[in-house]
Image (cartoon, rainbow, N blue to C red):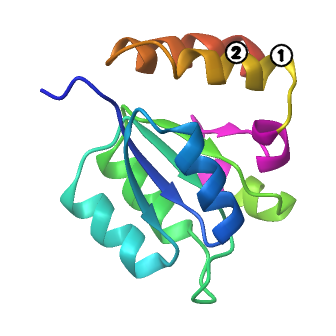
Amino acid sequence: MSNTIDVLIIEDSPERISFFKGLYKYSNCSFADNLRDAIELLQSSTFNIIHLDYDLADGFNSEKAAELIRSSHSNAVIIIHSENPQGVERLLEIVPDGYPIPFTVIQSKNELSNRFKAALNIPGKQQFSRIREILQPYFNK
């Protein structure tokens, strides 16, 4: 068992990808900027945290990826970071346990993002359970 968490970032913006690389610098990160790659990664690996954008580079959205997450990654922390309100609503219909946290909130310096970033500095798998503990009160999950 690995001592770090496994993270999948489904995102097509190079700027956001760069931000997530810095945010998860102590984790095993995989990135997908299109639906095909996202599905391939979800079918071949297990992830502790999955970030979902809605609109992807190939012109598709991430609904199919969300369906696969619902069926095969139910223990993962799902963070829907899309800025598309209708897309967020649709993804929450598919993965109702997801946490809708817009990218601008993750990137900002507010209480939630500061606590989330601090949890990422906890060594090993402990950070995974700490992240869930941090998110739950904000979303009543």
SS at badge 1: helix
Which is more toward the observer, 8 or 75? 8
Instruction: Look at the image and tell me whether residue 135 can be seen.
Output: no
Q: Position of residue 54 (x, y in %)?
A: 67, 66
Q: Amino acid at mark 1?
A: Glu
Instruction: Please tell me whether residue 73 is drawn above or below residue 141 in the rendered image.
Output: below
For disc 2, the neighbor class at 10 Å (few under 14, some 14 to 19, many from 20) is some
Q: Position of residue 132 (x, y in %)?
A: 53, 18
State the image quarter where residue 136 is shown.
Answer: top right
Which is more toward the observer, 93 or 62? 62
Relative to 139, is 97 on the left or the right? Answer: left
Relative to 34, is 140 on the left or the right? Answer: right
The residue beneath circle 2 is 115
Q: Amino acid at mark 2?
A: Arg
The residue beneath circle 1 is 111
Q: Position of residue 22 (x, y in %)?
A: 57, 43
